[in-house]
């Protein structure tokens, strides 16, 4: 039990360090890029696209679950003549 807690804390600390380094590298990449729009605007566009994709995914999942009682397709039965 104790080792699970230690691994959880170690994983959390590693995650925090990696997240901080990724943030720094992203900021450096935007700064060295030299313009072409603000990073805040790009982040907004990415966020909007991700939100739209999540909404479409949720809609498809909801529609699939709603019709879960009926098969989505009819199996083809070969006829012998």
Image (cartoon, rainbow, N blue to C red):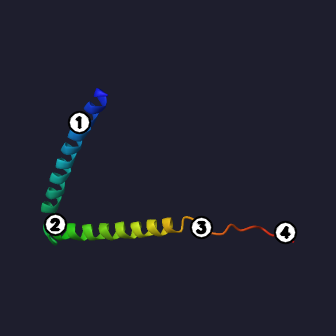
- Quick check: marks 4 and 1 in contact, CB under 8 Å? no
Q: Earlier in the sequence, mark 1 or mark 2?
A: 1
Q: Secondary structure at mark 3?
A: loop
- Whole-angstrom CA distance, mark 1 to mark 2, is 32 Å
Task: Give the crowd class for mark 1: few <14, some 14-19, many >=20 residues within 10 Å.
Answer: few
Q: Earlier in the sequence, mark 2 or mark 4?
A: 2
* Comparing labels 3 and 2, the label whose residue is closer to the camera: 3
Q: Which residue is mark 2?
A: 39
In the image, 40 versus 64, the foreground residue is: 64
Task: Give the crowd class for mark 4: few <14, some 14-19, many >=20 residues within 10 Å.
Answer: few
Please give left or right for residue 38 compared with residue 77 in the image: left
Q: Which residue is mark 1?
A: 9
Quarter-of-image position of residue 51: bottom left
In the image, 59 versus 15, the foreground residue is: 59
Task: Give the crowd class for mark 3: few <14, some 14-19, many >=20 residues within 10 Å.
Answer: few
Locate residue 68, reporting x and y percent.
Answer: 54, 64
Quarter-of-image position of residue 6: top left
Marks counted in the figure total 4
Q: Which mark is residue 70?
A: 3
Where 30 sits versus 12, above or below? Answer: below
Locate residue 2, reporting x and y percent.
Answer: 28, 27
């Amino acid at each position: 039990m104790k080792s699970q807690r230690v691994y959880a804390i170690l994983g959390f600390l590693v995650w925090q360090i990696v997240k901080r380094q990724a943030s720094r590298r992203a900021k450096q990449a935007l700064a060295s890029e030299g313009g072409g729009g603000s990073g805040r605007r790009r982040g907004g566009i990415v966020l909007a696209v991700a939100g739209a994709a999540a909404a479409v995914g949720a809609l498809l999942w909801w529609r699939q679950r709603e019709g879960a009682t009926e098969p989505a397709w009819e199996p083809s039965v070969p006829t012998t003549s």
